Amino acid sequence: MTAPRPIVNSWDVFDTLLTRFVPDPMSVFRLIDKRHPGFYEARLGAQAALDKIGKPYILHDIYAAMEEAGMEGAAARKLLAEELETERGLMFPIRAAVERVAPHDLIISDMYLSTEQIAGLVADICDLHARHPIIRSNWGKHSGTIWPKILQHYILRTHHGDNPNSDVAVPQKFGIKTVLLRDTDLSSWEKSLAEAGLTQLAYIQRETRLRSLAAPADLFAALACGPYLTLLLACAHYVHDTFGETAVFGFLSRDCDDLARVFRAVYPAVRALNVDLSRRLARDPATDDIFGEILPEGCLLVDMLSTGRSVGAFLERQVRPGLAFTTILFLDHLLKTEDAPGFAYLYKSSEFGGNHYPLEFLLQAPYPPVTGLAYDAASGGLIRGFGPNELLDEERRKIALKTEIVTNFLRAIRMRGLAPLTAAQSKVLIKHSLEVILRANLPDSQFPSFIARETHGPF
């Protein structure tokens, strides 16, 4: 009696479960060629020669062919190791696919890396450890020769992959249901960055999106992975370039937490602190002595959007010299206080139209408002009292995702490197990002706790 065949899903590997930072697969060879001129041509030439022979091969066979063409053996072994290390350094997981892989699913790849090398990448990059062995071939998916062999042992529920031919058209000929995954393509926002000459930033935001999202992006996630990250980066450069690297920056807590993190990542040597100046505390003279202790002279208070009223009242009570306040977006449609002393802004909300709530939704912090402060002068310890935890579970999940997105963005910047934006680039990106966010049709119903607090709350 024939043994029953397991019913499983199957998954391609490259650009399905994991991908490279630079989408072009030839980028690995070009990077190595910069260090070892002539490598690019020799490497591709050896692989092309094996393709013409038409017999299965793996990476070691490619380098053996390079040796046969005249490369010294020790040099070939060193370059092989360097290729693998370069590949590994560029790769990262695609979360939306990885989280859907079941323990007994098949992983199928048409690749010159060996079965063991691919399995190592799947474990190291994707954290998929206890798995069936990888099914690897050179052209099996593309030519169709591998599918009948797989169907002898498995019933494929669905095959997932990025290639319209080898992952979709060919397996469909064998009655296999398929899903085409193109998450690795640049999003419309990432394309706009690349077209503006900011290719490295586009790739960093692509990596952030693919690492962060476990499902297709809804509008909130698309804004968080797209214009919001660009806005944070551009604002960090703008306030630094406008007010100088010798300034002390005090980012107002909750709404400016994300901006403060980005600022410290790109300007780690500049002093930047988070200031718990909620509306309640800004209006409470009882906290003035504490702020007098913790705020340095000449501190620039920074907010993302503001009417300036609460902070303006606070600054009027403070006698410390040099304190000033700036906001990126001045909510002039709510209150016209642009002539307040020490108050500066970059853009007025009336210049954009739309509602400022979509930006407010993105700026939210995962913790409740600070309602009270105590300060231990002997140790410099600041104790914060918090209001009630007001968020619904769905609101909390969205804000947690946004916070994770910012974390992955900063990790990518530190890992990949990113040149500073020019002053002109910062202003253009801030304006464009604000235009997209403020005009986004993001329903108020997604954040009912925020709406209730803004409408009725004291903070």
Image (cartoon, rainbow, N blue to C red):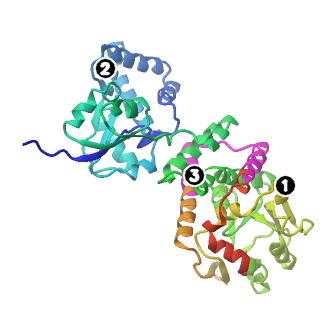
The disc, 1 or 2, on the residue closer to the chain's N-terminal end is 2
- Judged by depth in the image, the label closer to the viewer, 1 or 2, is 1
- Depth check: give the residue in front, 122 or 11: 11
Q: Is residue 417 magenta?
A: yes
Within-10-Å neighbours for mark 2: few <14, some 14–19, many 20+: some
What's the mark number on residue 102?
Answer: none
Question: In the image, is 102 to the left or to the right of 438?
Answer: left
Identify residue for label 1.
351
Does dot 3 land on a helix, a strand or a loop? helix
Percent across and percent down for residue 135 are 27, 36
What whole-number distance in Å separates the C-alpha atoms at marks 1 and 3?
29 Å
Q: Quadrant of the C terminus?
A: bottom right
Within-10-Å neighbours for mark 3: few <14, some 14–19, many 20+: many
What's the mark number on residue 409?
Answer: 3
Question: Height in image: 267 above or below 47?
Answer: below
- Depth check: give the residue in front, 412 or 178: 178
Within-10-Å neighbours for mark 1: few <14, some 14–19, many 20+: few
What whole-number distance in Å separates the C-alpha atoms at marks 1 and 2?
64 Å
Q: Is residue 74 magenta?
A: no
Identify residue for label 2.
64
Task: Assess whether mark 2 and mark 1 are in contact (beta carbons under 8 angstroms).
Answer: no
- Judged by depth in the image, the label closer to the viewer, 1 or 3, is 1
The disc, 2 or 3, on the residue closer to the chain's N-terminal end is 2
Residue at (62, 42) in percent of width and height: 188
Does dot 1 land on a helix, a strand or a loop? helix
Question: What segment is highlighted magenta in the picture?
Answer: 406-435
Q: Quadrant of the N terminus?
A: top left
What whole-number distance in Å separates the C-alpha atoms at marks 2 and 3?
40 Å
Q: Identify residue type, mark 3.
A: Phe
Query: Is residue 232 at least partly visible in the picture?
Result: yes
Question: Height in image: 320 above or below 426?
Answer: below
Q: Identify residue type, mark 1.
A: Glu
